[in-house]
Amino acid sequence: MIEVSSLSKRYGNHLAVKNANFSIKKGEVVGFLGPNGAGKSTIMNILTGYLSLTQGKVEIDGFDIMTDPELAKKRIGYLPEIPPLYLDMTVREYLYFIYDLKKVKFPKEPHIDEIIRLVRIVEVEERLIKNLSKGYRQRVGIAAALVGNPDVLILDEPTVGLDPKQIIEIRDLITKLGRNHTIILSSHILSEVQAVCKRVIIINKGHIIADDTPENLSKALSSDHSLVARVIGKSEDVEAAINSVRNVYSIECLGEFEAGSKDYRIVPEGNADIRGELIKRLAEKNKLTLLSLTSNELTLEQIFLRLTGEDDMGVYFGNTDTAQEEQPEEISEITEESEEEN
Ligand code: ADP
Ligand code: MG
């Protein structure tokens, strides 16, 4: 559905996207994850035809965004970082306006009715946009992206600035839309991407540094295959049971973290998956109860930090929009170029 090859984008002397390659299949829900300034919005603006590319090729459903922009853009619904809402219009007026702008062919009223129902803004459809909460405004932005029923939705930081309840509502909406659309969303917040995306493209300083499922990223980068078992029962019995499992390299009792039980770190030989047998052995002994078994795989957060070589989480993932400011020498270029680009 989306093919990006050797994509680069230069703003003045600043290379904001460096030789990016990825393809996204129909129906995928993919997250762009990266700190502020990584190049997420730049890539999205290029995919949606809002920004020209410096080098490379972008195809949407087989249509080249540079040579066939009309046909390529028809297939995309875009929620920009700051949706251009007309505050003095009512929700319905605004969606009619977008409908006209996009020259949509479906019958107007039923099409907009359907979108209003889908994104759940029925109760505010006659209200002026300026009187809506941020959560509702974001829904209106998503509704606008859905006008014309495009296959692909590109959502730039769809939950930024929302309160926790609104975040959950927008996430649920994205999950629902993911059943019928190919979706790319961006975020600088890990939990966000993890909650809705089956595939994560990690971007850092204009480079794609990883592209996989959250689980695979975690497995591939984790050198620690140890497990932690929380078990009720006498330590000698627990250790004897664990020792009867094949391919156990070592056991260490970590102490009591939950009353009446103890945690044991179990290191398998090599990459052996000992979980099945371990659970069986512990279950066989009727004086032992296995409360939980967890693996020590990395969280997406740890993966990101490992990949980027950064360890100051506060900078990248302290839920702020101002974190990770630009290098001073890049700022002058940005201001010069901004006028040209917009
Ligand atoms: P993200 O969306 O990941 O936060 P952006 O794509 O907005 O990142 O920005 C990537 C880099 O390009 C940053 O260094 C940013 O300052 C720069 N940049 C973004 N837009 C412009 C522009 N219009 N002109 C010049 N530089 C820009
Ligand atoms: Mg951005």
Image (tube, helix red, strand yellow):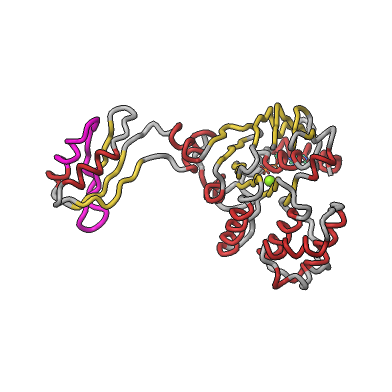
* Magenta-drawn stretch contains 250: yes
Residue under the image location 71 percent in, 38 percent down: 43
Residue 3 quadrant:
top right
Magenta stretch: includes residue 335: no
Q: Nearer the viewer, residue 262 or 196?
A: 196
Residue 157 point in image, percent of width and height:
65, 50
Relative to 218, residue 56 above or below = above
Ligand 1 shown in quarter: top right
Side of 291 relative to 129 (left or right) = left
Front position in the image: 58 or 27 = 27
Quadrant position of residue 166: bottom right
Where's residue 158, x and y in %? Answer: 65, 53
Position of residue 90 relative to residue 37, above or below, is below
Position of 212 with respect to 248 (left or right) is right
Q: Is residue 134 visible?
A: no
Q: Which residues are magenta?
A: 239-264
Quadrant holding the C terminus: top right
Point 58% across, 32% down: residue: 209
Residue 139: % across, % down? 69, 61
Q: Residue at x 64, y 53 (%)?
A: 177
Position of residue 341 measured from the top left corner of the image (x, y, whole percent): 83, 41
Res 150 visible = yes
- Screen quadrant of the N terminus: top right
